[in-house]
Image (cartoon, rainbow, N blue to C red):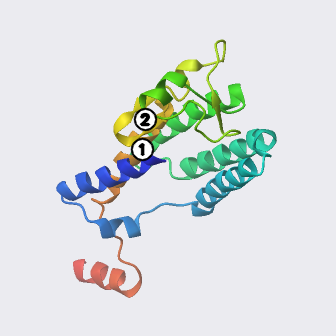
């Protein structure tokens, strides 16, 4: 989550330097917002379930629901710039989560960001063990400056979000209603 927040901030700066406007993001042609709400809600329910000790039992269902909702959002917006990278990143994360029942996290990477190796949300995450499937897709990339550990999928997903945000800032908002007709009539 920290990586996404930093990526969006950097993408806004890059979009602005490229001549884009933040207000254009408000007019972005994104569809399927309820799918994003469903993905976030599933993650929030998992956080609550984890806090009350039910996380490990509910994690596979809630993580699957969250990933499916995110995938649906990406599919309906697939033609926007950066969405191909978002699909690849989400698919990489989904593959390792489904193969392991949770996102494995490297002890060494946790220690590299000065955190105790057991400091993560159980149910959603678990320590990476020898023999786990797809260990190269787990949270193994330490980002000490951000005090977080991410996966290759997270990096690819963040790159896609960065491209999406900076490119959507360059798009002029569509003029709706009478102004659009007046503009079209005066151009004819």
Question: In which image quadrant can residue 174 be found?
Answer: bottom left
Could you tell me which secondary element the residue under label 1 belongs to?
Answer: helix
**Residue at the (79%, 44%) spot, across then down:** 58
Residue 182: x and y in percent read: 31, 85
Q: Residues within 10 Å of mark 1 (few under 14, many from 20)?
A: some
Q: Is residue 69 visible?
A: yes
**Residue at the (40%, 69%) spot, across then down:** 26
**For the C terminus, which image quadrant?**
bottom left
Per the image, the residue denoted by label 2 is 155
Give the mark, 1 or 2, whose residue is nearer the N terminus.
1
* Front residue of 55 and 156: 55
Residue 1: x and y in percent read: 49, 47
Tag of residue 3: 1
Circles 1 and 2, Cβ within 8 Å, touching? The answer is yes
Q: Using the numbered discs, state the Cα–Cα distance from disc 1 to disc 2 in whole angstroms.
A: 8 Å
Could you tell me which secondary element the residue under label 2 belongs to?
Answer: helix
Tag of residue 112: none
């Amino acid at each position: 989550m920290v990586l996404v927040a930093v990526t969006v901030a950097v993408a806004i700066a890059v979009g602005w330097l490229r001549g884009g406007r933040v207000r254009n993001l408000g007019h972005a042609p994104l569809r399927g917002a309820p799918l994003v709400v469903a993905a976030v809600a599933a993650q929030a329910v998992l956080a609550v379930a984890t806090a009350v000790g039910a996380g490990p039992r509910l994690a596979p269902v809630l993580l699957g629901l969250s990933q499916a909702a995110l995938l649906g959002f990406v599919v309906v917006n697939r033609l926007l710039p950066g969405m191909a990278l978002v699909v690849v990143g989400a698919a990489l994360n989904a593959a390792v989560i489904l193969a392991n029942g949770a996102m494995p996290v490297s002890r060494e990477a946790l220690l590299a960001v000065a955190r105790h190796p057991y400091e993560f949300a159980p149910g959603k995450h678990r320590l990476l063990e020898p023999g786990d499937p797809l260990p190269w897709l787990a949270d193994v990339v330490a980002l000490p400056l951000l005090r977080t550990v991410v996966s290759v999928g997270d990096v690819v997903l963040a790159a896609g979000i960065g491209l999406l945000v900076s490119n959507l800032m360059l798009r002029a908002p569509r003029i709706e209603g009478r102004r659009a007709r007046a503009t079209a009539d005066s151009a004819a």
